[in-house]
Amino acid sequence: MGSTERDTVIDDNEDDPIQASYDVYIKPQWEDGRQLYILQFPNRPSREDYSSTNASLPIELRLKPKAGLVELDVPLDPWTNYDRTKGVQWGEAMRKSNAAKSNTGTAGGQGGSHGLAGGFGIGGVAPGPGRGRQVQEDTLAVQQEILDDFSGGITRQRVLTKQTLGGQVVPKESASPNYFIGAFRKGQLHLSPVNEIVQMRPQFHHIDATAELDRLARPRAEAGPAGAGARAIHMTVKTTGEGEEDGQDSMAERIKNAQEEKWQKMRYIDDNSDAAWETFEELFAQDTENLPKLESGIDDATYLDIISAPRDEARLSRAKLVENE
């Protein structure tokens, strides 16, 4: 919907004159069911965005909509400022861990998951009988072979060449503000409603995978007493709502749902591609001349009451008496 007409009269004599004014248009939600996410990267400067321009075009984007989880794989340069030994160790750990999760059908069954998305390893593969020193020595020998043919190891995906960024959507509350994406064009501001906001931070899945493999390598006797069954997790989370009510098992249920939900893999489009520019054009309202005007349902005084601190009723009553006199 459109705004009222722009006020083109600018008083240059004011101490703080108006520099520009715009017609404002608010677009509805996407008609085809698409959603608009804002991905924030607090640990990375804006000038170093993940794109082909900076040789860091993301490899894959994944969503778990119900759990509100988002993950993004970005490339690492294994030839510059890179510890090859650690890269091989962590690359092999990720490969084996993902293979184990896929074979057992855990963590969504799509190549495995770690962290919250994988349920923090709860209910994963049980510890085995232990690999023994000989198997561990064989593992070191395999890692040395990969180091000797480092380029081939990268090609065969035996080296850690990607970093995972992840986050969870900001929960919406009744008092939460509504966010919009704004696009300017020829004295017009077009606003598109935002569905979700996610802060993407580095996820140390390679460390989780290494710890998981070490746990599986330990003999069952070290993992716990024989015959000990799985125990239910009981957690209590105190909400911040009125009454401070306790929610039993809410965290356990959250972990369970995140672990069971499958990833939805998305196609990542570079912001300099033609497809990205075509989508950018959809941020602008069409046929602006015939759009209905936005009309406020409240007057100026009511609006000021809404955005201001509570009034002093006694002082307000005195002001009304003076006005009536």
Image (cartoon, rainbow, N blue to C red):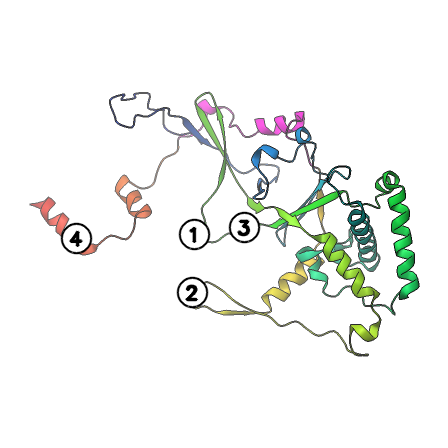
In-image side of 281 versus 26 (left or right): right
| Circle 2 crowding by C-alpha within 10 Å: few under 14, some 14–19, many from 20 | few
Picture quarter containing residue 213? bottom right
Q: Which mark is residue 170?
A: 3
In the rendered image, which residue does mark 4 sit on? 315
| Element under disc 2 | loop
Cα–Cα gap, marks 4 and 1: 28 Å
Q: Position of residue 315 (x, y in %)?
A: 17, 53
Q: Position of residue 101 (x, y in %)?
A: 80, 57
Q: In the rendered image of this protein, does residue 190 appear above or below residue 156?
A: above
Tag in front: 2 or 3 = 3
Q: Which label's residue is closer to the chain start, 2 or 3? A: 3
In-image side of 39 versus 209 (left or right): left
Q: In the rendered image of this protein, does residue 324 appear above or below residue 129?
A: above
Q: Position of residue 31 (x, y in %)?
A: 58, 36
Picture quarter containing residue 261? bottom right
Cα–Cα gap, marks 2 and 3: 20 Å
| Element under disc 1 | loop
Q: Which label's residue is closer to the chain start, 1 or 2? A: 1
Cα–Cα gap, marks 1 and 2: 14 Å
| Element under disc 3 | loop
Quarter that holds the C terminus:
top left
- Identity, as a three-letter code, of the amino acid under mark 1: Ala
In the rendered image, which residue does mark 1 sit on? 175
User: Can see residue 125?
Assistant: no
Cα–Cα gap, marks 2 and 4: 30 Å
Residue 90 included in the magenta stretch of the image: no
Which residue does the image show at 74% across and 52% down from the upper left?
206
Residue range (magenta)? 268-293
Q: Which label's residue is closer to the chain start, 4 or 3? A: 3
In the rendered image, which residue does mark 2 sit on? 242
Q: Position of residue 277 (x, y in %)?
A: 62, 26
